[in-house]
Image (cartoon, rainbow, N blue to C red):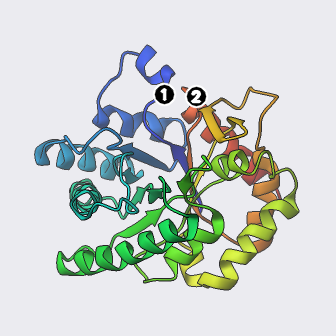
Amino acid sequence: MIKFGPSGNSEAFALAGYSTGEQAADWVKNMGLDCFEYSFGRGVNLSDGRAESIGAAFARAGVEISVHAPYYINLANPDEEAAEKSFGYILASAKKGALMGAKRVVFHPASQGKAAREEAVSLTAERLLRLRELIYEQGLEDIAFCPETMGKLGQIGTIEEITRFCETDRVFVPAVDFGHVNAREQGSLKTEEDYLSRLTYMTERLGREKMARLHIHFSKIEYTEKGEKRHLTFEDEKYGPEFLPLAKALKKLNLEPYIVCESAGTQDKDALEMKKIYFSLS
């Protein structure tokens, strides 16, 4: 079944006097949402005990949890030692996520740096083969590892690149951030067909079984000629994308993904708005 929820805790959550991951579980449930993404963006610094405690709270609430690996991962780094550290960040996120009951870990794949585009993409693909080996060696293959589409032109992570990476093995499941796609493509997502074309492309390449596990991030994002600048809220009227055309495309393709809202401070409220839009469609 399709799920909607926020990435992290909103401004309203903090203003209500809450602060802990355990409290977030009931907050999300009481809003009528279904999932939550816990971010290790600045590092995997959570103790095992806290991870288990947060996981237990979400299990009691019946809210599914995912995790986001640190933002500074770069599988295209030409330095092998740096690449090994990136493997470590992803695997540490997965292990901690497993203690929380998470079944998916989202990660930013790479940055282009000074390399030619195809060189950086090919190196990322090679490194993912090594990551795949480590995932199986460490018994983490039941977790979905989700490389994410990225919003800046200098980052690796177009729809086509993420699809290519996810063809590597069953453990790799796409995380499509439609705000990122819209930002790097200068406002390309406007109509139902704009979404259908991308989702159909991915389904044809990856198959229905893998796309049934699709992970989506959604928010409006301000952008420049270099791509993503900053996340916005649904109240913004200048930048997109809009969720309704995506909801229609998902209905038409009979896809029921895990949808995480990354709005700036209103992620729970906007996640609920997306859920209402989706279920308002016949």
Disc 2 secondary structure class: loop
Callout 2 amino acid: Thr
Q: In this view, does 25 lie to the left or right of 121?
A: left
The Cα–Cα distance between marks 1 and 2, rounded to whole angstroms, is 6 Å
Quadrant for the N terminus in the image = bottom right
Please rate how many residues cluster around mark 1, counting C-alpha atoms within 10 Å: few if below 14, some from 14 to 19, many from 20: some
Return the residue nearer the eye: 43 or 16.
43
In the picture shown, does residue 141 fall above or below 113? below
Return the residue nearer the eye: 202 or 65.
202
In the picture shown, does residue 76 fall above or below 227? below
Quickly name the residue at label 1: 10
Q: In this view, does 157 lie to the left or right of 250?
A: left
**For marks 1 and 2 on the same chain, the one whose residue lies earlier in the sequence:** 1
Could you tell me residue 4's position as x and y percent? 57, 50
Q: Which quadrant would residue 71 be assigned to in this image?
A: top left
Q: Which residue is drawn at 57% across and 29% down?
A: 264
Disc 1 secondary structure class: loop
Callout 1 amino acid: Ser
Could you tell me residue 31's position as x and y percent? 53, 36
Could you tell me residue 210's position as x and y percent? 54, 79
In the picture shown, does residue 43 fall above or below 106? above
Quadrant for the C terminus in the image = bottom right
Q: Which residue is drawn at 27% across and 55% down?
A: 93
Quickly name the residue at label 2: 266
Label pair 1/2, CB-CB below 8 angstroms: yes
